[in-house]
Image: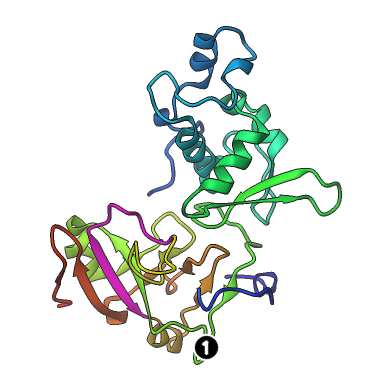
Amino acid sequence: MFSSRNRQNAAFPLWCPFTAAQSATVPPTNGNVEQTRNARGGRGGKRGRGRRGNRDGQDRDVSLSKSMSYVLRHGANQMGLQMGTDGFLFVEELLAHPQFRSYSVEDIERVVATNDKQRFKLRSHPEDGRLQIRANQGHSVQVMDLDLKPVVAGSLDCPAEAVHGSYLHNWSSIQQQGLSRMKRTHIHLASGLPGEDGVISGMRKDCDLAVFIDVPKALADGIEFFCSENGVLLTAGDTEGKLLPKYFSRALRLRPTRSILPLQ
């Protein structure tokens, strides 16, 4: 599934998971940028740049982060934005879109720098130096050059276990059918549970189900795993996009108290 360009030699840590949006615009939860700009007085909306609090009282940085996640993971093409095969999009083109005109380069740089899960990466284009941005993982569109590091069986950076976060109402289906990448390109796994040392991403904080995967066993069956730049383990699963229950090593109910769930 991945080209040789994925197999980079860059240094990584010891080792390193929604459904695609249903419309071609940023979801309504991000607020109506045009109405917000008009409410502040003036089409340019410059007084609002860098300030927090939109008309719904939602933190502007959270709103911007959600909007960027949608565009960079799912909706760039539908919104008329050109994303490269490496997932990068020019920041100036993003800010020129009506959905982002109330934001500035400084806003984007701040959101990228302060994002607790390190979802985004900024870089200067290697040829002309123009600022670009991409999502590190979570795509429903094919991105071939994400600088993913392959996990090799038997290597020091091959984990014995990785964990996928979900919700208890999904457990009956997961228990019988396994984990599915669904409309995304990968199943996401973390190196541990949220709050554990070194775990910054790979699972939503509100998950109440944790499914642990025997990584060496899956690798032995030819299932590929890759590590993203922010430490998330990614796999496309088998030919049907799944990690079958035979690769589950254990499962935990996380709330209200932690307890072991039977695998069968």
The residue labelled by disc 1 is 156
As for residue 215 lying within the magenta part, the answer is no
Screen quadrant of the N terminus: bottom right
Question: Residue 196 location in percent, x, y?
Answer: 35, 67
Relative to 204, 158 lies left or right: right
Relative to 244, 91 lies left or right: right
Determine the secondary structure under disc 1: loop
Q: Which residue, as the protein is rendered here, is positioned at the far top? A: 41
Q: Amino acid at mark 1?
A: Leu
Query: Dot 1, how many residues are within 10 Å of its Cα: few (below 14), some (14-19), or many (20+)?
Result: few
Residue at left 53%, top 78%?
A: 14
Question: Residue 167 location in percent, x, y?
Answer: 23, 57
Height in image: 248 above or below 186? below
Screen quadrant of the C terminus: bottom left
Height in image: 65 above or below 55? below
Magenta region, residue range: 201-214
Q: Relative to the observer, which residue lies in front, 165 or 177? A: 165
Question: Residue 26 location in percent, x, y?
Answer: 49, 32
Q: Is residue 80 visible?
A: no
- Which quadrant holds residue 5? bottom right
Height in image: 195 above or below 162? above
- Which quadrant holds residue 99? top right
Q: Relative to the observer, which residue lies in front, 231 or 186? A: 231
